[in-house]
Amino acid sequence: MSVNKGSVRAQIRRTLTERILTGQYQPGERLIELQLAHELGTSQGSVREALRELEATRLVETTPHRGTRVRMVGVTEIREAYFARGLLEQAAAPAAAAALKGKGEGLRKDVVAILRAADLRDYPEQAARVYSLHRTIVAASGNATLLRLWESLAFETWVRIRLGWGEINRALAESSYERILAALGSGNGVLAGDLLRTHAEAFAPPLLEPEVQRTTE
């Protein structure tokens, strides 16, 4: 039975993406094609194609004589990603609110988990829950293009939290999420969109990250 090369490449891409976003591969870490091919039980060519697709989404970068590495991200780029993510979530909100009307309990569990992880300073768990919550909202819109664009910005937000910039203004996060969930639950997509954009902008890092009292998410 023949195996679809596109499916193999997509599976490799998903695996590597998950490893990058969960911190298994750290920023700057080299990804070696031959080693990955052996580990994943696939061809080096399939790994190379998957890495090229990851480079297109800016999760990795390839430079001469250094190979392919998980991309490093600066504060300015992270800040820009937050603002762009807010705009995408605002665009997704009207359709998402229609789909999520009356179904806020699942989202509320993620919010509780975000706040719990923040209290414990479990930044990987916090990042995973933030990703899960916001991805669920964007995915509910049914717009695959919006979701793909949003996912391309997830790396920047994840890196920020993993760098230890995960301490949040808890009261602000809790009240912000409460308003967002209420708007989604009532089906008010316009309000939910405004709140999601405002939320992203409120938690975007300042250009000069302060040493104390960071309000990040």
Image (cartoon, rainbow, N blue to C red):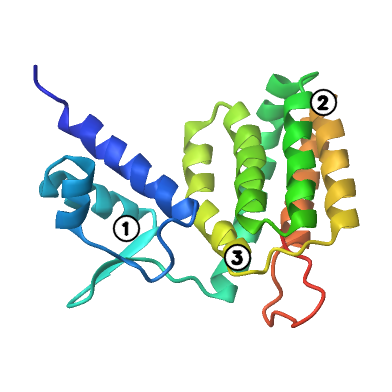
Front position in the image: 120 or 185: 120
Residue highlighted by disc 1 = 55
N-terminal label among 1 and 2: 1
Residue visible at 38% across and 71% down? 28
The amino acid sitting under disc 3 is Arg
The amino acid sitting under disc 2 is Gly
N-terminal label among 2 and 3: 3
Query: Residue 10: where, in percent of width, then height?
Result: 29, 37
Query: Residue 59: where, in percent of width, then height?
Result: 40, 58
Bin the neighbour count of mark 1 within 10 Å (Cα to Cα): few under 14, some 14-19, many 20 and up: some
Snapshot quadrant of residue 183: top right
Mark 1 residue element: helix
Vertical placement of residue 65 versus 44, above or below = below
Marks 1 and 2, how far apart at CA: 37 Å
| Labelled pair 1, 3 in contact (Cβ < 8 Å) | no
Snapshot quadrant of residue 35: bottom left
Query: Residue 15: where, in percent of width, then height?
Result: 35, 42
- Dot label at residue 154: none
Marks 2 and 3, how far apart at CA: 29 Å
The amino acid sitting under disc 1 is Glu
N-terminal label among 1 and 3: 1
Residue highlighted by disc 3 = 160
Residue highlighted by disc 2 = 185
Q: Is residue 32 left or right of residue 175?
A: left
Residue visible at 67% across and 28% down? 96
Residue visible at 76% across and 33% down? 109
Residue 21 seen in render: yes
Residue visible at 65% across and 58% down? 123
Residue 153 seen in render: no
